[in-house]
Amino acid sequence: MPAQVWRLMIAYALMMSGTSLMVLIAGIIAIEIAPSPGFATLPLALTIVGLAVATLPTGKLQSRFGRKRVFLVYGFVAVGSTLLAVLSLVQASFWGFCTAAVLMGWSAAAGHQYRFAAMESVAAEHAAKATSVLLFGGILAAVVGPEIAVRGRYLMETEFAGSYLLLAAVYIIGIFIIIFYHEVREFAGSMVMKGRSLVQFVRSPVIVLAVSASAVGYGLMSFVMTAGPVSMHEHAGHDLQATKWVLQSHIAAMYLPSLVYPWLFGHWKFRGMMWAGICCLSVSLFVASLGTQFIHYWLTLVTLGIGWNFLFLSGTNLLRYGYHDEERFKAQSLHDFTVFSFQGLASLGSGWFLYHWGWQGVIFASVPLLLVFALLVFFSSAWPQEGITGKKHPGINQNPLNS
């Protein structure tokens, strides 16, 4: 991998660490300053909403100004969100903290585009390796975010205000790394998002399959993962240390398969990797239905993470077979908007299902979506004639299945 891919991976880890920080402490903070305990999950939900809403505008801005400028500007938006969070905590302003959460989610939309920048930084046959390396940065983000949350808890007089101050420093380091990123493809300063309309995109079998793979992987992962810790700790009575270990195992299972994904893809290609993801998610749901012992939760969350990895990486890499070069920003934005909107709905719906139907209700509600996606994969003919490891550049014009 060229140095640019490794720089993007480190920048991705730093710029996405705010998300893992919010997962850990946003609810704790909200309980203290929210007008009602019922608003405790709102800041984290708004982070996801901000991410989903920002994806389409982010793509349009990148098409007009290029990736680097947008990455840098969004980096400063991220820094601003942390400073607003510090001010809101000092003033005990819940709605100010919610605004900071939205801005943090908005800035994360650029961070998720780093994987496309990594793909463009290498030859076509190395795209799977580039996305795998980039996604591996998620493990670093999962370590950095909670670590600075804990270390900054009492750094200032107001609890957790120092955590966001440390996060600002982390973001600034990420911005410095992005300064060394260089555009691989030239663009016209007055360029608009060219090519087919969004309606035409959703008629493309390749686009539909790619977006569906990523959305189902992210949606099911969020739906089950959000309910898992609450069910395990509050309902099944497992202690906090056991719950923490299961979550850490889940995060590792989400990103560690990225190391072997290129090798597996070389043997199984897109169809095989998607069936592997479906199988992992099926095993996850089956194990969860068997009981609520520690081993059940552990195996459920581990296989859930692996299934997410296989589907999300497959969807991301398959997407580039469905658009012309001048359409890349529009297609990538459509992909991320759909995926993260689906994630947001899944996260919000998970709590409702858990409250009304319990852990088994969450599991059984996941089955129909996975079944529908399995049928889509079974009947789909939208498979590239050559995989990522092929010698030809996998442009849309070289694959008649994209028409």
Image (spheres, helix red, strand yellow):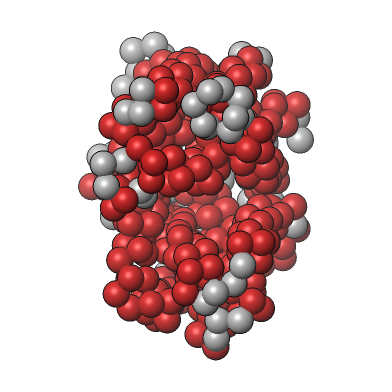
At a point 57% along the width and 53% down the height, the residue shown is 313
Residue 217 in the image, given as x and y percentages of width and height: 48, 61
Question: Total number of numbered labels?
Answer: 0
Q: Looking at the image, is 55 positioned above or below residue 164?
A: below
Q: Looking at the image, is 120 positioned above or below residue 172?
A: below
At a point 59% along the width and 72% down the height, the residue shown is 238
Residue 351 in the image, given as x and y percentages of width and height: 35, 63
> In the orientation shown, which residue stands out farthest toward the front?
157
At a point 53% along the width and 68% down the height, the residue shown is 233
Q: Is residue 244 left or right of residue 59?
A: right
| Residue 140 sits in quarter | top right
At a point 69% along the width and 27% down the height, the residue shown is 7
Between residue 4 and residue 287, name the one nearer to us.
287
Q: Is residue 380 visible?
A: yes
Residue 174 in the image, given as x and y percentages of width and height: 61, 22
Q: Looking at the image, is 389 positioned above or below residue 69?
A: below
> In the orientation shown, which residue stands out farthest toward the bottom?
290
Between residue 162 and residue 1, name the one nearer to us.
162
Between residue 302 and residue 146, name the one nearer to us.
146
Residue 177 in the image, given as x and y percentages of width and height: 65, 19
> In the orientation shown, which residue stands out farthest toward the top?
189
Between residue 386 and residue 150, name the one nearer to us.
150
| Residue 109 sits in quarter | top left
Image quarter of the N terminus: top right
Q: Is residue 124 visible?
A: no
